[in-house]
Amino acid sequence: MQDDVLDTATHTGAASTTPLKQAVFRSSKASRQGVLERLFAFVFEGLVYPQIWEDPVVDMDAMAIEPGHHVVAITSGGCNVLSYLTADPARITAVDLNQAHLSLLKLKQAAIKHLLAHEDFARFFAGSGSPLNVELYDQLLAHRLDDEARHYWSGERTLAGPRIELFAGNFYRHGLLGRFISAAHLAARLHGVNPADIMASKTLDEQRWFFAEKLSPLFDKRLIRWLTSSPMSLYGLGIPPAQYTELAEGRHMADVLRERLGKLACDFPLSENYFARQAFGRSYASPPAGGQDGMALPPYLDAENWGALRDRIDRVSAHNRSVTDVLAEAQPQSVDRIVLLDAQDWMSNDQLNALWAAATRAAAPGARIIFRTAARTSPLEGRVAPSVLDRWAYGKAASRRHTARDRSAIYGGFHLYELRP
């Protein structure tokens, strides 16, 4: 789950405490909850999301980005930040406190600027991997990255080669999310079900049959219910202990996951849902025997947007900062659109109030803020000071509509706020 208290933590407390730890650590380290929080912070330091898990088409519809707009967005894997460029904003300030996510965005930026053709770019980020990607990195990209990004991709992994070699194979099988999906496939296969078989479906009815007959019963299995009963089981989705509780909403997590997976499997054709293709088929492309051929891609990977991306890529600036700090230091009334992903699920009341005070100060007339939540409801009422929150109008009907249209299907709610005149 996207994305990222990494990006919203404020810089308070002891210097030895990282922003991630400040945001995640809510309990005594001697308590069970405190141990879970510290384990989560440890595993969340590296690459989490090889692909961001929010639908950029829904984002862009909700934001209604116009030429001249300044967008501030939490970065995660960079997919959505680059997709927003297709809407022609004047600039995008991309922020993240996870250096791995920023390095991924910077690699994509360099590839857009310096690879010779869309075919090369697609081989990197839309394909299932090729040794040629590593050669192109060495020849055209490495020396054009800043020191931090080059150190990340050229750096050696434990007991393995440089990280850039992940692109010689299927990059989307890596990171916490990629490994979580692989583990979920293994668990399903141990129960006699191959989730990839849904890719042979030719219609929504066939997808729904597969889910009802093959996938849904898995969540009644004793092993699955036991595994999902612990917050640690969902670390691979980027869900910290606090967000696990929000996601559960008092129900068993296996039943919540069945509901969310059902939307992913049943509500959208596989031909247009690249989230489902990655979750079930582990690729943007249908397998050779698949029922819905071709590619389903995020906007930034679509060939028709290649020229626009190359023309506009310098409008994106990447910052290893918290979104709260960036907004607090922005010129007043200078930010038109703000994307918070699901970060607020992780935040204390003090952090929420600091974020919304900074956003309100930076917001231009007509500014919009979008975010997602594990639960269905917005976390702001009763937590953000009325003097700040009353400056914003909540688009209740629009939020409900965008929630239904979000192809990633992971979140309980999509939320849209607009600055009042």
Image (cartoon, grey):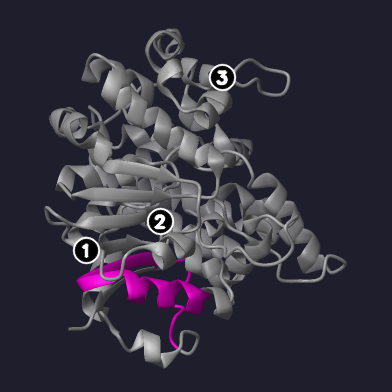
Distance from disc 1 to disc 2, alpha carbons, whole Å, reads 24 Å
Q: Position of residue 354 (x, y in %)?
A: 49, 75
The residue to which callout 1 is attached is: 62
Residue type at numbered disc 1: Ala
Q: Is label 1 in contact with label 3 (beta carbons under 8 Å)?
A: no
Direction from residue 12 to residue 108 in the image, left or right: left
Residue type at numbered disc 3: Ser
Q: Residue at x 16, y 32 (%)?
A: 311
Q: Nearer the viewer, residue 140 or 173?
A: 140
Judge whether 132 appears above or below 52 on screen: above
Q: Nearer the viewer, residue 207 or 41?
A: 41
Q: Nearer the viewer, mark 1 or mark 2?
A: 1
The residue to which callout 2 is attached is: 262
Q: Examine the rendering and report whether any part of residue 413 can be seen.
A: yes
* Dot 1 crowding, Cα within 10 Å, few <14, some 14–19, many 20+: many
Q: Could you say which quadrant of the image residue 69 lies in?
A: bottom left
Q: Which region is colored magenta?
A: 352-381
SS under mark 2: helix
Distance from disc 1 to disc 3, alpha carbons, whole Å, reads 38 Å
The residue to which callout 3 is attached is: 154
